[in-house]
């Protein structure tokens, strides 16, 4: 009898130990989960989610990838066209005259100086309360890098006819590039944004643009930048080229396209009804 009682007590003790072990394991797992929940949020980098949402907000949802691709192609062409004008030594764009003059004194590439000047110009947006787009940020970097690459990898033309050919081709490419990157609708370049920012304060955009470009041309020329017939030809031609290519390459919203298409269909239907009415009469 006593032996049976001892065995029963031993079984009970063993069951209690197993139950205690199971409860202890469950308790420890629960505590670990609690600690992980406490540690988890602390391991997240603050502001990353907000930064991602901000970057997404810079690009409209409508044809986002197409807009980004068109933007980068336009900026790449823009930098290449700037480099083409520079290697002719017949005169650069107004801002590149300034960049070239600074680069000669500071010992850097013209494209590198364009990046630095673009970043400084964006600081002038702050008092004007201008908001940059992804196109603005890309413009600062991509154009300068493409200009440096073009000047480094392209052979300098020596014959006058080749220099003129490169010059005219560069100006035409610049017009196409302007249509591409502005048509993407992702924000103006830093220099264009400066002009439009002053214009939004009630100043004439023609006066503002002329004042800024005359200032940078004269400053660049005094610093040793190349001011020549190419600069004058660019100034005359870029307006009509941009006027042609910006509407041609602009990405309109699908809703606007649908509305335009519907209006055209309604107008066509109305003309058809009128024609049929006249024929039956």
Image: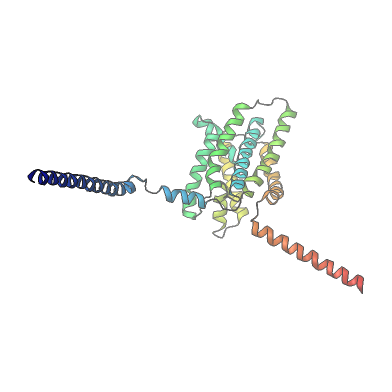
On screen, residue 163 above or below 171: above
Give the residue furthest to the front: 1
Number of marks: 0
Q: Residue at x 52, y 45 (%)?
A: 137
Q: Residue at x 33, y 47 (%)?
A: 40
Is 272 left or right of 117, judged from the image as shown?
right
Q: Position of residue 50 (x, y in %)?
A: 43, 51
Q: Position of residue 165 (x, y in %)?
A: 73, 32
Is 224 left or right of 53, judged from the image as shown?
right
Q: Quadrant of the C terminus?
A: bottom right
Q: Position of residue 161 (x, y in %)?
A: 75, 29
Give the residue furthest to the bottom: 281
Along the line of sight, the residue nearer the viewer: 127 or 215: 127
On screen, residue 133 above or below 200: above
Could you tell me if residue 100 is visible in this image?
no
Along the line of sight, the residue nearer the viewer: 104 or 116: 116
Q: Position of residue 43 (x, y in %)?
A: 33, 44
Looking at the image, what colour scheme do you see? rainbow
- Residue 82's quadrant in the figure? top right
Is 105 left or right of 158, judged from the image as shown?
left
Could you tell me if residue 127 is visible in this image?
yes
On screen, residue 207 above or below 174: below
């Amino acid at each position: 009898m006593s032996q049976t009682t001892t065995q029963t007590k031993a079984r009970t003790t063993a069951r209690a130990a197993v139950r205690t072990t199971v409860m202890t394991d469950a308790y420890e797992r629960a505590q670990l989960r609690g600690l992980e929940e406490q540690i988890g949020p602390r391991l997240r980098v603050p502001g990353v989610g907000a930064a991602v949402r901000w970057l997404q907000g810079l690009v409209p949802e409508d044809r986002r990838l197409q807009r980004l691709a068109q933007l980068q192609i336009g900026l790449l062409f823009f930098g290449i066209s700037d480099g083409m004008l520079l290697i002719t030594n017949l005169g650069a764009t107004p801002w590149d005259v300034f960049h070239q003059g600074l680069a000669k004194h500071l010992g850097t590439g013209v494209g590198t100086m364009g990046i630095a000047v673009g970043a400084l110009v964006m600081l002038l947006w702050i008092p004007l309360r201008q908001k940059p787009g992804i196109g603005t940020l890309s413009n600062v970097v991509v154009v300068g890098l493409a200009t440096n690459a073009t000047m480094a990898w392209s052979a300098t033309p020596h014959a006058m006819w080749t220099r003129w050919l490169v010059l005219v081709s560069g100006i035409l490419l610049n017009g196409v590039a302007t249509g591409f990157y502005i048509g993407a609708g992702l924000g103006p370049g830093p220099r264009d944004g400066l002009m439009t920012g002053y214009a939004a304060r009630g100043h004439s955009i023609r006066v503002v643009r002329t004042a800024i470009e005359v200032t940078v041309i004269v400053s660049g020329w005094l610093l040793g930048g190349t001011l020549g017939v190419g600069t004058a030809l660019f100034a005359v031609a870029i307006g009509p080229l941009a006027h042609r290519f910006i509407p041609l390459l602009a990405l309109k919203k699908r809703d606007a396209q649908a509305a335009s298409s519907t209006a055209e269909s309604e107008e066509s239907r109305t003309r058809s009804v009128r024609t049929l009415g006249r024929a039956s009469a």
